[in-house]
Each structure stands twice: as structure tokens, then as C-alpha cells.
Image (cartoon, rainbow, N blue to C red):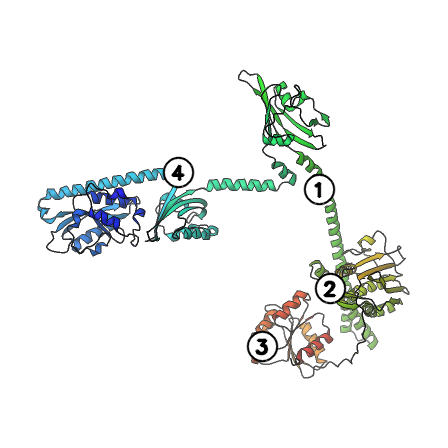
Amino acid sequence: MSELFSRKRPSKVSELIQSRDWSQTSLGEISTWSATLKIALGILLKADIPMLCIWGRDRILFYNDTCSSLLPADGPAVGQSLSHLRSEQSLSAAVESVFVTGQAAEAQPASIAGQSTKPAYTWSCSAISSDLEQVEGVLAIGVKAAEELARPSLDSAQTALEKSNAAFQAALRESEDRLRMAVEAAQLGTWDWNLITNELIWDSGCKAMFGLPAEAEVTIETFFTGLHPEDRDRVEQVIQAILEPGGENHYDIDYRTVGLQDGVERWISARGQAYFAADGTPQRFTGTVLDISDCKQIEQALIASEATAVAQAEELTALMKTIPAAIWIAYDPQCHQLMANQTAYELMGVEPDTVAAASLADGRYPLQFKQFKNGHEIPTQDLPMQKAIRTRQAVIDEIEFVFPDGSVRHIYGKAVPLYSPTGAVRGAIAGFVEITALKQSERAREQLLQRERRAREEAEQANRLKDQFLAVLSHELRSPLNPILGWSKLLQTRSFNTAKTAQALATIERNARLQAQLVDDLLDLARILRGKLHLNPAPVSLAFVIEAATETVRAAAAEKSIALQLGLDPELQVLGDAARLQQIVWNLLSNAIKFTPEKGQIDISLRRRHNQAEITVTDTGIGIRSDFLPYIFESFHQEDISTTRKHGGLGLGLAIVRQLVEAHDGTITARSPGECRGATFTVRLPQLNATFTHCPVKVSAKPALNLDGLCILAVDDSLDTQELLICLLKQYGANIMTAGSGAEALKILKDIRPDVLISDIGMPEMDGYSLIQQIRALSPEQGGQLPAIALTAYAQADDQRQALASGYQRHLTKPIDIEKLVQAIITLLQPSPPA
């Protein structure tokens, strides 16, 4: 800026301008002033007639030395607002007229000093416009009012003003044209952010990059709105860092914009500079933007191409990593003088910069490998470059490098002859790539195809097994329904004697329990497959477990006159889950009973073998075919899946048994001499070293279950379940109210306080979870602490946890076990023991 204020003689006003702190004004530091203002001040300070320059929205006042003598001693100072000038209203009005209309205006004679002792002047005012045709300032030239009579003097002043303004505009246009040409040539856009006024100026190129027309108005909010949402925070953080005092004030960032009117996404490269006041306050932030969308598209295309290459087989990826190709150049027709690139040296296994001849004609550069094709060594004259020179044609070939250590490298490429200006062959050039990985991958691919065929066959077999399982599942679920529905219908439509009625009810119960067992098996398998099978390990007496399991199947064995023989070591114990261990033994015994004909025998033994406890279940049943034994413990596998099979089941029992045994760190095996010769299942579990002492437990008399006088609210959307609960619980003396929905239950609770709530979970509109949460939100006086039991068909462990977390104190599963339900009610209502 020093050249702006340079004059042949000292200028007081220029010194005032340079010494003033502009950082607190809307103009900011002098270094940030626009070219338009700098040119205007250059004309002002060099003029010998009174001149004023009024700039910007704050009407900041500048004047020259000639004009300063017309001002009063007490100001106003350079840089203050025009409003501080105690002049007549005509000058202020003329200035405002020019700012608004852009047209020249003339003020009536006025004293800018506001004193009669100072002469009055007539002021001719003209606009100073930017390249955007916006009025940025006003230039005013003063002529004494007394000279108004001498019009030529005024005309002369006006002419001087016009010439000065014309010179100013020409200089400004020249500067702007040079800048515009440079910007347009570089296809740049420009921006200028006044950090004092928060005004933002974009040229048409910058606006286009934000999808805006040239005439659009912009603010700093426009900029941030136009940024891609994924880039907005990043750009804002960079700008904040740049505007921090003492930080990096150079702006260099790439970001995306989304056209505010055209919606087009563009990539922009922005460069800029922040300017600060002496006290570190940011004043101005300017720079350029460049549309790099094409570059980004190319870059993204390259990235996509690379991703496609990565998707190829590993062998092709490995091959691509060997690029660039091995290049050999022969400088003579005999191929004695050879040069090669780094890849070629590595391929041949020689040191870089070694000259190696492919011909042994002179014997100076023998190669350390032999070259083969189709299992035969290639004669020197038939090597690719020699052959290309001899035939004067391009040669495409595949060659094997066989090294002394037996390793082989395969290469593939092309050799072409090189010609001198006279047309004579002067040498050859060859480019080859190593395809060893490709050759190996071909073998691997064939092996992979073979594995894929086997995997596909296994998958098809699994699908067949699944279809077979679904067919069996349908059969096994429907079969118990037939006697249940049949006897239920008969009991509804006919009258039977007591014995027949008891037979019907026993049949219904037996088949219902069979269905429940099928569901339990499916749930166990689901837990196992999801890895959510949980054990509660504790020291367990295996003899006690086996005896308990035997008691549960003894009635079924008696029906077929099957003898159960036990030989148990009472001292053996393991660390395990007693319930799951009993499930293992029960499953093995149930299978043995199912497949053993009447009057057969089942032997169950427990003995110590080394440091393991060995459980053996041997039957005299139908045996197992040798070809089926390998699949006996797999899910959904059954030896007989025909429609004429004699024995039902899902084929899950032994699969679950194996998983339970392995969960106890044990093993299970199956043996059978053949069909109709029985089978033996052996379970081995790690023995617990500690001595187990079995203490007989005194069993107290089971208390009678009694719900006399209790008021119970049962909520279930199934009317059948409601009626069943009424019938069952009334037998124990309870008073029952029912509700078919959560909303109905809440309505009942407004008027009645039951002792216990029993609620289903899966109900329309409001499920059991929502119901209990709304109840728990009530005050204790409104029933918020009502004891509650969830009675639901959702039987998974996660379902139980969710029910308890929602506010229920108990979780019971359907089908209803009335004794468990009554016991749960009694336990729930028992007072807690004092702490």
C-alpha cells in the first residue's frame, strides 16, 4: 500500500490514513482493501482540488489535504462516518442519492464545516462502482459557491471530476479485466468474504460451482447450505482453524457441493488466504475455487477399476502386481548386446545392470537357467527375439525358465524386430510378463472347482434333508393332533362311561405332551445353533441322575414289557448341569424303548474308566445299519424317512444329546452289530476328583395348594385360554376375572385391586410388555406394585429375561401346567423373609 500514499510532497491525510487502526472498522486492515477502493484513494490523494470519498454501507469518509482546510479543527477524522460532518443536508442527500441510484448528483452550496466563517461549496458527486455494477462509494469534488457565477470554473471542475472518474474507472476496469481474464483462462471462480461486515461476494464462476445463476444473491449461509452434507462439518472445522489468530492462514481444501438450484453434485478445489488485523482479529478471507469434478470422476473411475481388479481371483491379482513387464532390448542382430529393466533382472535371477546375452555364441554371458516350451528346450535361434529378427515378424510366445534348483518360471509376451533408417534389422525388443502364478492358479482353480462341486452336492443333500425334515415335522406335529381333536370331538358330542372318558383324557394328555416335547426339542436345537445353550454346572451324582431318568421312562417300558437293568457305581460324580445330564440319559432311554420290540431288555451301566465316567445304554432293539451309523448324531437325519416307517420322531434327539454331551466336555459314540441285533450308546464325561457324599434329603409332605379367597385377573386374547384358566383356578378356590386385551385390563384395574395378575405376552394392539410397563408406572395406591406372572407361548431364555425386565416377577410357558402356576402364585404372594 505504500505506493498508494506516495506523493512528491508530504501528505498529512495519507499519513493519517496509514497511522489509523482500521481493524475495528467495517473496512478492516488496509491490506484487505479492495482494488476499487485503493484506486479511488489514489485519485483522491493526488488531486489539488477539494475532494471527498464516501465509502461503503457505513459511509466512511476520506478527504485530501486541500479539503482538510475546509473542515473545523475538531474533525471529523479520516475514517469516521459522513454523519459526523456538520454540513448542510444537501450534501448528505446528494451522496445518498448517488448510492441509491448510481446517477451523478449535485449538492447546493454548503459549508462542510458547519460554520458561516468557512466558505460554502457546491459539490458534484459521482458513483464508484464495482465489477458487479454495485455502488461501493461516492467521489465528490467541491467548488466555491462564489465561483458558481463563473460557470466555466465549475464546468472545468466538473470536467476534471469526469476525467478523474473516467481515469479511475479505466484503471479499475483494466485491473479487473486482467484479473478476470486470468480467472477465466484458469476456469476459476473467485470469492471475497468481509469478516467485519460478514458480506460475501462471489463471481459468476463461483456461483456456477454452487448451481446458481450469475444474478443470484449470496451470503455465507448460502456457502454452507451448498456444501455436501458429508463435507460440511469438515470444511467448517478447516475454516475455523484458519481464522484462529496465529494459525495457518492458507486455505487449501477439496470438497463437494450440491447445486442449490440444479441439484448437481460437483467436486471443488478451494484455495485462499485469511488476512488479520494487528491484534489478530480476522478481517478478510479471499480466494479461488476450481471445479475438479472431471478429475474426481477419473479418480473414482480408477478406484472402481482397481476394485474390479481386486475382485478377480487371487492368482490374477498376484499376476497384476508384477507389472510393469520385463523388457529386453537387443542392440545387435545377434542379440549379444542386451539391456533389461529391473523386472527382467529379477525374473532371470541376476544382479541389476548385468549385461546377459540370450545367445551363447560368444560364451561371455552364459545364462543360469534353461528355456523350455512344451517340455522341450528351445534352440537359441528359436528364442522370441532371435526368431523375430530372423523372420522380421512379431513373435508371441510362452516360455518356461527352468533354474538349476528345479524351480520354474513361466513367462508370456511378445518380441518385435527393430529397424535402422535403411530398413535393416538392427535388433529387437521384447516385453514379457510372468504368468507363474496364473499357471499355479489354473491348477488351484481346478481344485477349487472340484471342491465347489463337492460343496454343491453337500448343499443339495442338506436341502433334501431339510425338505425331508419339514415333511417329517409336519407329520409328527399333525399325528398327535388327530387323537386330540378326535377324542375332543367325541367327548363333546357323545356320552361315555367313566373308563372310556378316562381313556380319552389320557390319550389327549399323552399326545399333547408329545407335541410339547417336539417343541422343546426344536427350541433346544435353536439354542444350540445360536450358541445360546446355557449350563448351570455343579457337582452331580450320575447314579442319582440315571435313576431319576429311568423312573420317567419306566411306565413306557412297562407298556412294552421291556426289562430295565441298572448297574451303577454310586460314587461317580461329574461337574455338570443335572437337568441337562438327565435329559441326555432320558433321551437315550426313550430311543432305546422306541426301537426295542416287546419283551426286550435295556441295560444301563455306570462305571469308572480311567479318569472318566462312562454311561452305557444297550438295547436288544432293531439295531442300526452300518451305512447310517456315521450320521446317527446329525440333525434331521433318520434311518427310515419313508411314509411306511414304523417309528416317528424328528431326528433331533440324538443331535441334541451329542451337543449336550460335548457342552460337558464329553464324548458319545454309537455301535451296532447290524439290523435286528440291538445298539449300544456310550457317553464318557470327565470325572470330578472330589469325593461325593450323597446325603439323603428329608422330603417333607407336599403342602396342599390353596388359593382360597384370592382375586386373580387373567389377561389373554384367547377366549379358550380365559375359560381354561377360570376352570382350573376355581378348583383351587380362587376368584377369577378375565380381560381380552391390555386396554380392558387397565380399565378393570381402575375399579378393582386384584391380588395377582396373570397375563399373556403376544396380544394385538397392546402386548403384555406394554401392559405391565403401564401398570408399573402407576402409584402403589393405584396398583403399581401388583404381583404379576407372564403366562406365554414365548419360551426362549431371551423371552424370560425380557418379561422379568419389563416388570413381571415370574415367567411361565404354555401349555399350562396348573400345579406350577398355582405354586408360582402362592410363592409370589408369600411375604419376603426379614433381612
Residue that label 1 marks: 448
Which mark is in front, 1 or 3? 1
Residue that label 3 marks: 784
Q: In the picture, which quadrant includes the N terminus?
A: top left
Gap in angstroms between the C-alphas marked 3 and 2: 35 Å
Q: Position of residue 112 (x, y in %)?
A: 16, 53
Mark 3 near mark 2, Cβ–Cβ under 8 Å? Answer: no
For label 2, count other residues whose C-alpha is less than 10 Å away and answer few (under 14), some (14-19) or many (20+). some
Q: Residue at x 62, y 32 (%)?
A: 346
Total count of labels: 4
Gap in angstroms between the C-alphas marked 2 and 4: 76 Å
In this rendering, position of residue 554 left or right of residue 116 = right
Dot 4: element: loop
Q: Amino acid at mark 2?
A: Val
Gap in angstroms between the C-alphas marked 2 and 1: 40 Å
Q: Earlier in the sequence, mark 1 or mark 4?
A: 4
Q: Nearer the viewer, residue 25 or 276?
A: 276
Q: Earlier in the sequence, mark 2 or mark 1?
A: 1
Q: Residue at x 56, y 40 (%)?
A: 305
For label 1, count other residues whose C-alpha is less than 10 Å away and answer few (under 14), some (14-19) or many (20+). few
Q: Quadrant of residue 308?
A: top right
**Do we see residue 76 in this rendering?**
yes
Mark 2 near mark 1, Cβ–Cβ under 8 Å? Answer: no
Gap in angstroms between the C-alphas marked 1 and 3: 65 Å
Dot 2: element: helix
Dot 3: element: loop
Q: Quadrant of residue 826?
A: bottom right
Which mark is in front, 3 or 2? 3
For label 4, count other residues whose C-alpha is less than 10 Å away and answer few (under 14), some (14-19) or many (20+). few
Residue that label 2 marks: 519
Residue that label 4 marks: 186
Dot 1: element: helix
